[in-house]
Amino acid sequence: MAKGFNRGMGMPGGMGGGIGGGMMSQFKKLQEQMEAAQSRLTEMTVTSSVGGGTVQVVMTGDQRCKSVTIDPDMLKDADAEMLQDLILSAVNQALDKSRDLASQEMGPLASGLPF
């Protein structure tokens, strides 16, 4: 066998002529960018308001509920079923907004993947 050839790949240089090292460097950089984006998402928030502002939900970009605010006037009527429906609607809307935010932050990074 000729000197300088990798037995497993049959290519000079032992790592496919340097291709493997560059790819690993790109993956490492992409991983760092993704971690930074995920970190930013923990600080970013979205707000969902339903029932004319009766119920408001604030959620982070990583889908953590930060707060639920209920207008005290809503409690005077004591319609538990309506309040439950409003909370459910506000939480689901906030989740959708949070996922959209995450997609906006992480989406550009996915375009850097070589797949």
Image (tube, helix red, strand yellow):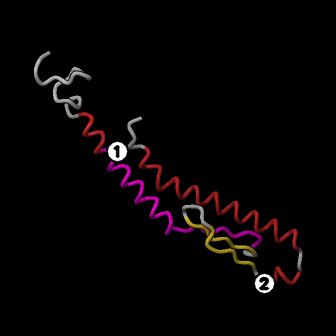
Horizontal side of residue 65 vs 85, given as left or right: left
Q: Choose mark 2 or mark 1, whichever is in front.
A: 1
Percent of width and height locating residue 96: 64, 57
Q: How many marks?
A: 2
In front of the other: 65 or 85: 65
For the point 87% across and 73% down, the residue is: 80
Horizontal side of residue 44 vs 53, given as left or right: left
For the point 50% across and 54% down, the residue is: 104
Which residue is denoted by mark 1 in the rendering?
27
For the point 55% across and 68% down, the residue is: 45
Dot 1, how many residues are within 10 Å of its Cα: few (below 14), some (14-19), or many (20+)?
some
Residue 101 figure quarter = bottom right
Amino acid at circle 2: Pro
Judged by its main secondary structure, the magenta piece is helix
Which residue is denoted by mark 2 in the rendering?
72
Magenta segment boundaries in residue numbering: 26-52
- The magenta stretch spans residue 34: yes
